[in-house]
Image (cartoon, rainbow, N blue to C red):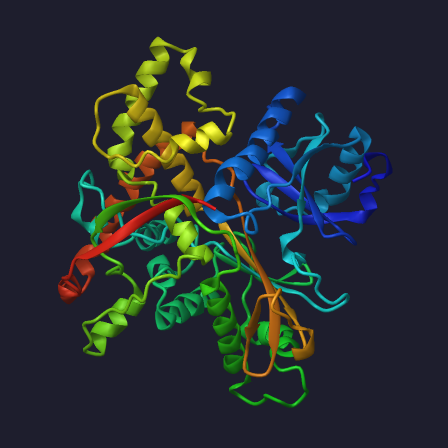
């Protein structure tokens, strides 16, 4: 990227979160990511540079090890002309959602991250000018806590996502409960996965977005602004799945097209496109409580139909959902078991503040940081070293629980497909595809007390307002115990 020839008119607003804002280039498949700060809270340029470099290093040296080279795009830090940044800020201001304008774009340092635009990612040389469909899914936590430190039995039965839904609706965050349950998506069972994806499409919230040629066509633009019309979505999707006019029409047209989309998403999520072989394999058998959630609408539907067996086919080891679950399961103690260790670390750092840099809490996130994550012992020996390791593992696990998966699809003809390109088939079309993972910023050490308090709020609200109303037959569903192996390896 030539910093001297930057033109703000070639860039447009792409989206933003709590801590950063992204703009995309109108021609090239790249985006720039800028940090945001509350008014009058800007950091010094060297702090910005270190912060951004930490994000790049964490993706490069840590998350790439869990997900694989092809899945993680960590980008690079670039320095831009300040005049360009200020003009860009003015240009996009009117496009920003009002609820996000409480923080300002960093216009003083000139530093940003340059990354591939994953809504238009062309890992394989897709045919030029051919349309690209991109589905972004934020799957959330795919397992129920198995830690003996859990104090409330409900946490061994109902997943965090399903419990949190009730609190979010009560607080006005969302208008309706979602039927989506992450454990259905992570089950590997196609029927459960189809149900999970259908539920996401019915109530996308901020867990699903669909882009066409880089433009958002379905999902939440912001908390209060949602594009969620199935008929409109089907109109966008029809040329992808039924290229010839008149192939599908009538009252069932929308449902047929949506089913095609769900099938394709499922198959890509179960596919393995990373050819790297696992090295330095290290396994720890862990007895898990359940591979299902009692609050899942799919589970309840089984009970209503008189069935009492929940299918969980298991995920293929090479697929991205499996690798995501691996990283998530570094949370071996649950926040209830982790919080006392956080307090131990805090007490130690108060006594020896110089140890904060040695412990790598604030970086650098390098190979040495990753190697420490591979200590999977759960027996507390009372040392600060044990506490530091578990705290860092928890932060990585929380990062994996909040990541997003991007699936890019481009139509291809049969004679264009080759063994080098992964292909997924629909009823009357075929797609080359690529899968990526993003939102991989390491969760802050300072957020652990907040997570502990939030966990208590979620569980207490659910126990007080939801569980008492639930059908008691659900507690008799699936009594079997299951064994699962946590596999950690380099790729």
- In terms of depth relative to the viewer, which is nearer, 373 or 345? 373
Q: Is residue 172 visible?
A: no
- Count up the numbered dots: 0
Q: In x, y percent, where is residue 430?
A: 60, 76
Return the x and y of residue 436 as percentages of the image width and height.
Answer: 56, 53
Whether residue 311 is visible here, answered yes or no, is: yes
Tell me what residue is drawn at x 34 percent, y 9 percent: 351
Residue 291 against residue 373 in the figure, above or below: below
> Residue 186 at what x, y percent from top left?
37, 59
Pick out the residue farthest to the right. Answer: 5
**In this view, 140 is above or below 340:** below
Along the horizontal axis of the image, is 302 left or right of 273? left
What's the residue at 53%, 88% (across, down)?
A: 251
The picture places residue 365, in percent across and down from the top left corner, at: 50, 29
Along the horizontal axis of the image, is 436 left or right of 151?
Answer: right
Quadrant of the snapshot with the N terminus: top right
Q: Residue at (16%, 48%) from the top-left corner?
A: 153
Indicate the quadrant where residue 212 lies: bottom right
Q: Nearer the viewer, residue 361 or 254?
A: 361
């Amino acid at each position: 990227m030539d910093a001297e020839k930057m033109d703000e008119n070639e860039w447009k607003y792409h989206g933003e979160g709590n801590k950063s804002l992204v703009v995309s280039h109108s021609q090239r498949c790249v985006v720039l990511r800028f940090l945001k700060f509350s008014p009058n809270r800007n950091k010094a340029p060297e702090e910005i540079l270190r912060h951004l470099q930490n994000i790049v290093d964490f993706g490069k040296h840590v998350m790439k090890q869990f997900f694989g080279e092809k899945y993680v795009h960590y980008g690079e830090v670039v320095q831009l002309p300040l005049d360009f940044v200020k003009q860009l800020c003015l240009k996009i201001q009117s496009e920003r959602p009002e609820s996000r304008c409480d923080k300002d774009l960093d216009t003083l340092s000139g530093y940003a991250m340059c990354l591939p635009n994953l809504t238009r990612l062309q890992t394989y040389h897709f045919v030029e000018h051919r349309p690209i469909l991109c589905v972004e899914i934020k799957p959330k936590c795919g397992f129920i806590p198995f830690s003996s430190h859990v104090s409330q039995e409900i946490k061994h039965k109902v997943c965090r996502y399903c419990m949190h839904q009730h609190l979010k609706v009560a607080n006005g965050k969302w208008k309706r409960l979602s039927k989506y349950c992450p454990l259905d998506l992570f089950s590997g069972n196609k029927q459960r996965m189809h149900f999970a994806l259908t539920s996401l499409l019915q109530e996308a919230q901020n867990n699903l977005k669909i882009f066409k040629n880089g433009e958002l066509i379905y999902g939440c633009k912001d908390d209060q602004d949602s594009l969620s019309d199935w008929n409109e979505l089907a109109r966008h999707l029809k040329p992808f799945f039924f290229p010839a006019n008149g192939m599908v029409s009538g009252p069932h047209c929308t449902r047929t097209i949506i089913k095609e989309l769900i099938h394709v998403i499922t198959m890509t999520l179960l596919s393995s496109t990373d050819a790297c072989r696992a090295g330095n394999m290290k396994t720890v058998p862990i007895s898990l409580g359940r591979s299902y959630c009692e609050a899942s609408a799919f589970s309840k539907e089984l009970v209503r139909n008189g069935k009492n067996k929940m299918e969980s086919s298991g995920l293929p080891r090479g697929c991205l959902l499996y690798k995501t679950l691996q990283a998530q399961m570094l949370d071996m103690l649950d926040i209830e078991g982790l919080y006392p260790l956080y307090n131990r670390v805090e007490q130690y750092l108060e006594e020896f503040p110089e140890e904060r840099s040695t412990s790598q809490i604030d970086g650098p996130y390098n190979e040495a940081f990753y190697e420490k994550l591979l200590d999977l012992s759960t027996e507390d020996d009372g040392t600060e070293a044990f506490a530091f390791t578990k705290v860092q593992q928890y932060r990585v696990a929380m990062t994996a629980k909040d990541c997003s998966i991007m699936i890019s699809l481009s139509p291809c003809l049969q004679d264009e497909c080759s063994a080098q390109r992964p292909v997924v088939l629909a009823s009357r079309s075929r797609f080359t595809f690529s899968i990526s993972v993003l939102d991989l910023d390491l969760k802050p050490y300072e957020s652990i007390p907040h997570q502990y308090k939030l966990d208590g709020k979620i569980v207490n609200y659910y126990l007080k307002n939801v569980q008492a109303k639930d059908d008691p037959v659900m507690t008799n569903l699936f009594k079997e115990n299951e064994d699962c192996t946590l596999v950690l390896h380099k790729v």
